[in-house]
Image: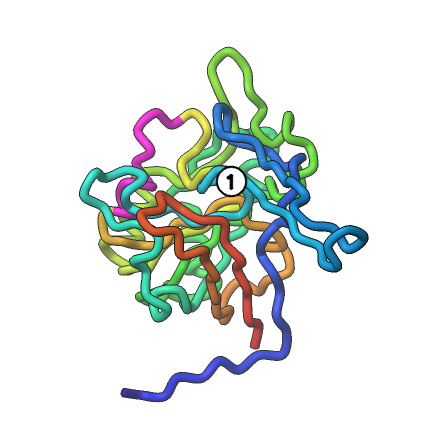
Amino acid sequence: MAIKQIQFRQVISLSHPINPRIPLWPGDPPVEFEEVASLETDGYFLRRFSMGEHSATHMNAPNSFYTDGIGIERYTPEDLVRPAVVIDVRDKTQGHSDYEIGLLDIEDWERKHGQIEPGSVVLMYTGWQHLWNDPVAFFAQDAQGSHFPGIGEAAIGFLIEHRQIAGVGIDTHGVDFGQSSTFATNHAVLAGNGIVLECLTHLDRLPAKGVTLVIGLLGLEGGSGSPASVMAFIP
């Protein structure tokens, strides 16, 4: 087996801290902490916590959309170490919360930075990470549902078929845009046991290419997803 090395000068966490105030998908269970032991009484501090499998910075598993899909614990360690690129679409999403990232966005990026390499995770920086502390603005819900940008069907089809990517990530609460009723991007990526990362942060601190992602998961047996500790190694 060939020896692989990660060379880096900086490591940046792309995960939000978890607390009961984070934005939650409508209908998802709350984030709750309960003290089990205290320093004063027990000599050590311990809490139990409860939250949904798709809350905070998290990764989706195929069984969240496919009845015969694998659970989150079935991803191998090798699956979770990937090169990544960052596509900045903030100029398109400002004032357009229902924006669907399309082929033109990918073509614009590749003109500047070269072709996306097979096996990469493509991260979309929409600017929504900056709304994280305002759950109302993060989802922008109204009578039609939630409003936030996501990856369009044509774009994800191109990335999978013609660039053989390993997966996608985004700083919104869904790789599918908020008004989607089909979740086409999730379906397309997870059909091949790919990586879907949502609610990322600090994408503004990453270069457009050259990053290596290391994704830490909870090995929840049969899990439809897991909160994720996503580390970006910057050369």
Residue drawn where x is 43% and y is 35% of the image: 100
User: Three-letter amino acid code at disc 1?
Assistant: Ser
Quadrant housing residue 232: bottom right
SS under mark 1: loop
Looking at the picture, tell me which residue is in the foreground, 202 or 38.
38
Which residue in the protein does label 1 denote? Answer: 55
Looking at the picture, tell me which residue is in the foreground, 181 or 39.
39
The quarter in which the N terminus is drawn is bottom left
Residue range of the region highlighted in magenta in the rendering: 180-190
Quadrant housing residue 130: top right
Q: Chief secondary structure of the magenta span? A: helix
- The picture places residue 88, in percent across and down from the top left corner, at 54, 51
Q: Is residue 68 left or right of residue 181?
A: left
Residue drawn where x is 44% and y is 33% of the image: 177
- The picture places residue 198, in percent across and down from the top left corner, at 48, 45
Asked if one can make out residue 209 in the rendered structure from this viewpoint, the answer is yes
Q: Is residue 5 above or below residue 154?
A: below
